[in-house]
Amino acid sequence: MKYAALFLLLVPTLAFSYSGGPPNGYTGAPGEANCTQCHGGNALNSGNGSFNIDGPAEYVPGQSYTITVTLQDPGQRRWGFEISPGNRGQVTITDATNTQMGFDGGDLYVKHTSTGTQNNTLDGPVSWSFDWTAPANPSDVTFYAMGNAANGNLQSGGDYIYSATFTTTPATALEPAPRPADFALLDVVPNPFNPSAEIRYQLDQSGEVSLAVYDLAGRQVARLVQAVQGAGRHSARWNGLTASGSPAATGVYLARLEQNGRVQVQRMLLVK
């Protein structure tokens, strides 16, 4: 009886915790689990609903696009999802009320918040959106996703789990890559990162160079380079520390490269 009582206490705890967002790594991607492992009773894709991912058929490296996930199922009333492009590109949360981001082993995940379950929305459809910035190195990118059409009883049974994939390919007429002589802030590797990232850039001429890290409020967090450098490719590493030597907080930062009045900026995400 003691263990039975403990189980009854744990089940609603699990239900409430997952309504606040599923664990990372449950998108059904190769090597990953799917949500039927926690929401039992119905086979994957066995319901009468639909689950779709909308995004660009083709992408230009470095450009941002809106990705939208839509789920509906007759008779269900609470909703959830998790989607991941692996470690390809960057994600910006545009609706923090209904969506959130997670990271695991270099892969990034977008999933619902507790409010984002849109409880008591009978039948659906419900949608969640976020912005995705395409990777600098072009190749096919596949998004893997799971959707949960739940009955709202705060238990793990009676829910229908759906899977979806979406693949976007590099545009056939890509913008030309920067020539070796171009002034360019090339990449931040890895991105997201913890605890440090390498910032790569190239110069088309010799001269005084400034490379610094700023927060989104425009405050300088750390200066990485202030020196005369020659034309060619260069890199600098940010160790995630502020100018005073204290650890920077989790969040989005801007790498800012400047030379001879020209400026390039790239976002990077520090996670802990």
Image (cartoon, rainbow, N blue to C red):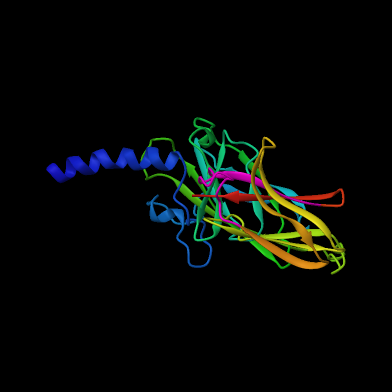
Apparent side of residue 261 relative to residue 128 in the rendered image (left or right): right
* Residue farthest along the front direction in this orientation: 228
From the viewer's perspective, is residue 97 above or below residue 45? above
What count of labels does the image hold? Answer: 0
Say whether residue 91 is magenta: no
From the viewer's perspective, is residue 5 above or below residue 134? above
Q: Position of residue 16 (x, y in %)?
A: 38, 37
From the viewer's perspective, is residue 272 above or below residue 207? above
* Residue farthest along the left direction in this orientation: 1
Task: Please give the name of the residue rendered at 51% of the width and 36% of the height, measured from the top-left corner.
Answer: 117
Q: Position of residue 51 (x, y in %)?
A: 59, 49
Read off the magenta span: 238-258
Say whether residue 245 is magenta: yes
Which of 267/32 is in front? 267
Q: Position of residue 35 (x, y in %)?
A: 45, 53
Task: Please give the name of the residue rendered at 51% of the width and 38% of the height, measured from the top-left corner.
Answer: 113
Q: Position of residue 240 (x, y in %)?
A: 56, 51
Residue 74 visible? The answer is yes
Quarter holding residue 123:
top right
Rendered-image quadrant of the N terminus: top left
Apparent side of residue 121 relative to residue 216 in the rendered image (left or right): left
Residue 48 visible? The answer is no
